[in-house]
Image: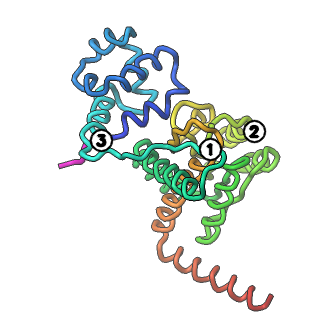
Amino acid sequence: MLPMLKGGLVSIEAAMASLTPSERKVAQYILEHPQEVVSLSVQKLAEFASVSEATIIRLSRSLHFKGFQELKMRVAGDLSQTSLPTEAYQEIHANSSVGELIKSVTTNNIVSIQDTLTVLSPESVEKAIQTLSAARKIGVFGVGASGVIAEDFKQKLSRINRWCEIGTGFDAQATIAANLLPGDVVFGISYTGQTEDMIRSLAVAKKNGAVVITLTRFGANPVAELADIQLFISTLEKSIRSGAMASRIAQLNVIDILYVGIAGCHYEESVKSLDMTRQAVSVGKRIG
């Protein structure tokens, strides 16, 4: 028997800021009445939430679900969990004890990864792995904190002999994008999905025929809208500062998933490359 789909409530909360006012209205109703909603028809939910039936269909699509039935199935899956997680995102306050800091930061990181599992599409991950594995060139873009994630991905790809360049600012990103061709890939990392330089650079790469893959927070955003393959993470903290930390962990987790998948597509070659780079670094250290 297939496991019941989950992630409806997390998806709604994660996407709330990017929804239209009418979509947000029905989303809030679902969050407040999840057990009632799983047994409602689209007509009844529209009546109770005081929105149109079309709004509910648009909301389902905004959440990247096939329709209202899948939305209900995912909410039902959330409610069916026999042991709901007791931990939630914890704000970090001034004058917290070291013990409180350890618990808060660790909890936020764990919950961020768990929530991301509910919005990360296996189909999209599979497409991303296959596309990256077959790419002639890979451009990895990230700005600010996302630039650190881009550096990590670039280092991992280099270790398994995947040709890639990294751009952490507009000039570098635009230069890389301008030289990409069909069959190449650009991977854009932006937590907010609002980074202007990233949007301009991805548009150049797309115009040149490169496949665009993005990693952003869940919900509609300009960066993800440019993508041929969309990957999402979810972090629900109220605080921007704590969000920047937990989102980084969730992003790194997705990068690790992609890296292992790509390495698996070229297993023998990847193992050989890892051994060669390990030996080269070891020799370099002894000479130094």
- Sequence-wise first label, 3 or 1: 3
The magenta stretch spans residue 2: yes
- Sequence-wise first label, 2 or 1: 1
Q: Nearer the viewer, mark 3 or mark 2?
A: 3
Q: Position of residue 106 (x, y in %)?
A: 52, 56
Q: Secondary structure at mark 2?
A: helix
Q: Secondary structure at mark 1?
A: loop
Q: Position of residue 227 (x, y in %)?
A: 57, 39
Q: Which residue is mark 3?
A: 5
Q: For this rendering, which residue is in front, 65 or 206? A: 65
Q: Which residue is mark 1?
A: 93
Query: Identity of the amino acid at label 1?
Result: His
**Magenta residue span:** 1-5
Query: Residue 94 vs residue 10: left or right?
Result: right
Location of residue 78 (image quadrant): top left
Query: Residue 243 vs residue 205: left or right?
Result: left
Q: Position of residue 254 (x, y in %)?
A: 51, 54
Number of other residues with Cα within 10 Å of mark 2, as a class: few under 14, some 14 to 19, many 20 or more: some
Q: Which residue is mark 2?
A: 197
- Colouring scheme applied when the structure was drawn: rainbow
Q: Position of residue 211 (x, y in %)?
A: 59, 46
Q: Given contact means CB atoms under 8 Å apart, are the residues at marks 3 and 1 in contact?
A: no
Q: Secondary structure at mark 3?
A: loop
